[in-house]
Image (tube, grey):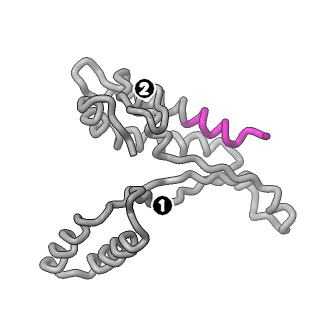
Amino acid sequence: MLTFATPADEAQADQLMQPCLIRVVDNIRKHTETLDWRSEYLEQVRWPGTATADQRQQVRDLAAQLQAASPEQATVLRQQLSQLPTPTPAYKLRLTEGSALAEPLTETLAEKNSTATLDVWELCFGVCFSDYQPQQPVSVDLALLDDDGEINWLALDEKAKALVAQAIDQVIAPS
């Protein structure tokens, strides 16, 4: 869970997080195209630490009911959901070595493949915030905004490109 250094940082992060995600994902694509590694995204959910197993199941059940609900039923279901802990989406990038080659022909060859995983949101946070450290209050990197408070797209793309390349190169480096 992010803690913002100031209310202004929270407002600026609201403006920047979607563009950061887009630039991170695009730069992941560009960087992984040059590697002999297969990349795939894994979608997960993060639950607040206070969410019980029963509450998690209740949220899943209500969300499933919402899919086929009438407008009247949907209103009631959304109200019930609003009273429960809300999960947030989490995305992991899994990289598997040797993907440009055909599928391994033997179990032995498959066992030699290396796998690395990156948290996409952590990369986004690294782009969006100055000196991002998990569990510490965050401040928006003001270099990502111009003098009028608008997004500086060039600075955003350059920072995303550099952080993505550094993170991927670090996790796939030979041990």
- Mark 1–mark 2 contact, CB under 8 Å? no
Q: Which residue is mark 2?
A: 130
Residue at x 53%, y 53% (from the top left corner): 92
Would you say the magenta stretch is mainly helix, strand or loop?
A: helix
Magenta stretch in the rendered image:
164-175
Disc number placed over residue 33 in the picture, else none: none
Q: Return the x and y of residue 139 as percentages of the image width and height.
A: 36, 28
Q: Label 2 sits on what residue type? A: Ser
Which of the two residues, 160 or 77, is positioned nearer the viewer here? 77
Q: Quadrant of residue 129?
A: top left
- 170 in magenta: yes
Task: Locate residue 20 relative to residue 103 in the image: left or right.
Answer: left
User: Is residue 26 shown to the viewer in this render?
Assistant: no
Residue sitting at the far top? 147
Q: Badge 1, how many Cα within 10 Å: few under 14, some, many 20+?
A: few
Which element is circle 1 on?
strand
Residue at x 47%, y 34% (from the top left corner): 126
Q: Quadrant of residue 113?
A: bottom right
Q: Which residue is mark 1?
A: 44
Task: Locate residue 128 relative to residue 100 in the image: left or right.
Answer: left
User: Is residue 157 shown to the viewer in this render?
Assistant: yes
Measure how far apart labels 1 and 2 are at the Cα level. Answer: 26 Å
Q: Return the x and y of residue 39 as percentages of the image width and height.
A: 61, 53
Residue at x 26%, y 76% (from the top left corner): 66
Q: Badge 2, how many Cα within 10 Å: few under 14, some, many 20+?
A: some
- 23 in magenta: no
